[in-house]
Image (cartoon, rainbow, N blue to C red):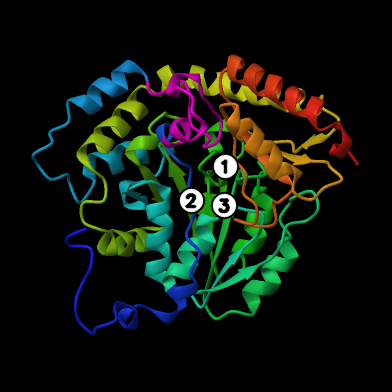
Amino acid sequence: PPGCAHEGNMDPEQFVRADLRTFTKYKGVETIEQIAEEVGLPVEQLVKLNANENVYGAPAVVRERAAQATLHVYPDPAQTQLRAALAQYHHVQPENVVAGAGSDDLLDIVIRMVGPTAIVISTPTFGMYSFLGKVFGTKMVDVERKADFDVDVDGIIDAVKKEEKCIVFLPSPNNPTGNVLSNADAARILKEKCILVVDEAYADFCDTTAMDIFSEHSNLIITRTFSKWSGLAGLRLGYAIAHPTFVDYMMAIKQPYNVNTVAEQAGLAALAHRADILPSIELLRKEKDMLFDQLKSLPWLRPVPSFANFVLAEVLSTEADTAKKVYDYLRSQGVIIRYFGTQGGNLSSYIRVSAGRPEHTQALMDKLKAFELENRAILGK
């Protein structure tokens, strides 16, 4: 088409970093409309259980506040109101808070602020850490989790001691396994010369938080998001809580207007009306427990106990690719779950399912039982 082809002898590749030529893109979730077109089903018939969203959505009062945002004026680059509201909620000072376009934005800002010689992660985990580290060109050090997916704290400490300046990224609860990092383990890591970033995207679905030890450790950064608990995933709003020195630098190097006015107003409303959102969080916690029990009832699935709003389950089979087959089959039937393969660690025999409404769990189980009927010969070990 006109405008796509270019004449001349300048090869654009010569200007691109050499390491990006073999770079693996981060694979996020597709839109529901794209999936509907692919599988040939109406959007309203799909069951979306692949992104750990709050399926109940934001309450009307939050949506109304967002709709009233002033669109023709730039947002406040200092994030004055939002930082004050977040500080009040977490019982810290505004100088401890910086917001961004989702918590991913804050993770990126931390890496750019530090310029680490290495980033330490613990797979299986959120694939965004290695993605951002590779974009920055930083060495990635993976200390694999134990068989029960707990963090190998001794291994992480050993890795930290070998580096001049490093960041340790550990989510709690961990995505996609759902287990938490104890504050005792976090405190051990924090004794070392490193920055520990505890990613608490799912903290609202459990009762453990690193905020309990925040005041004791100047090298602790905690990130949170509005995407999971408040039903605002589409607006991309997150924040970090850190020592004022870190916050000063993060505020200095962030994109000036990285929180748009709609997201800011929705976030303020969500904080002010958190009591209206809490019932949906409780519903999702209960449904996650129900989902775990239902998955456990199938002898060829081994679900992992989770403190988040999702459940990871191992697919037991005599064939190596059965988890992918389960994912593909459910997708063809309009039930959308998550299959990671090797993104974020070796998860080729696992599937992850988000907690939804009770009818979503029922639809999932109906399709899983149908898959079982067609594949009995390869299921189980």
Q: Earlier in the sequence, mark 3 or mark 2?
A: 3
Which quadrant is home to the C terminus? top right
> CB under 8 Å between callouts 3 and 1?
no
> CB under 8 Å between callouts 2 and 1?
yes
Q: Which mark is residue 126?
A: 3
Q: What whole-number distance in Å separates the C-alpha atoms at marks 2 and 1?
A: 9 Å
Foreground residue among 130 and 211 = 130
Instruction: Find out whether residue 52 is within the magenta segment.
Output: yes
Q: Residue at x 17, y 62 (%)?
A: 3
Task: Please give the residue where the numbered disc 2 appears in the rendered image.
Answer: 222
Considering only vertical position in the picture, is 86 above or below 131?
Answer: above
Amino acid type for the residue under numbered disc 3: Phe
**Can residue 137 be seen in this snapshot?**
no
Locate residue 10: give its quadrant: bottom left
Amino acid type for the residue under numbered disc 2: Ile
Please tell me whether mark 3 or mark 2 is closer to you in this view.
Answer: 3
Foreground residue among 142 and 240 = 142
Please tell me whether mark 3 or mark 1 is closer to you in this view.
Answer: 3
Q: What whole-number distance in Å separates the C-alpha atoms at marks 3 and 1?
A: 18 Å
Amino acid type for the residue under numbered disc 1: Thr
**Can residue 324 be seen in this snapshot?**
yes
Q: Residue at x 42, y 36 (%)?
A: 34
Residue 380, image x, y percentages: 88, 37
Task: Please give the residue where the numbered disc 1 appears in the rendered image.
Answer: 209
Q: Which residues are magenta?
A: 34-58
Relative side of 155 to 377, left or right: left
Question: How crowded is the residue under tag 3: few (<14 C-alpha within 10 Å), some, or many (20+)?
Answer: many
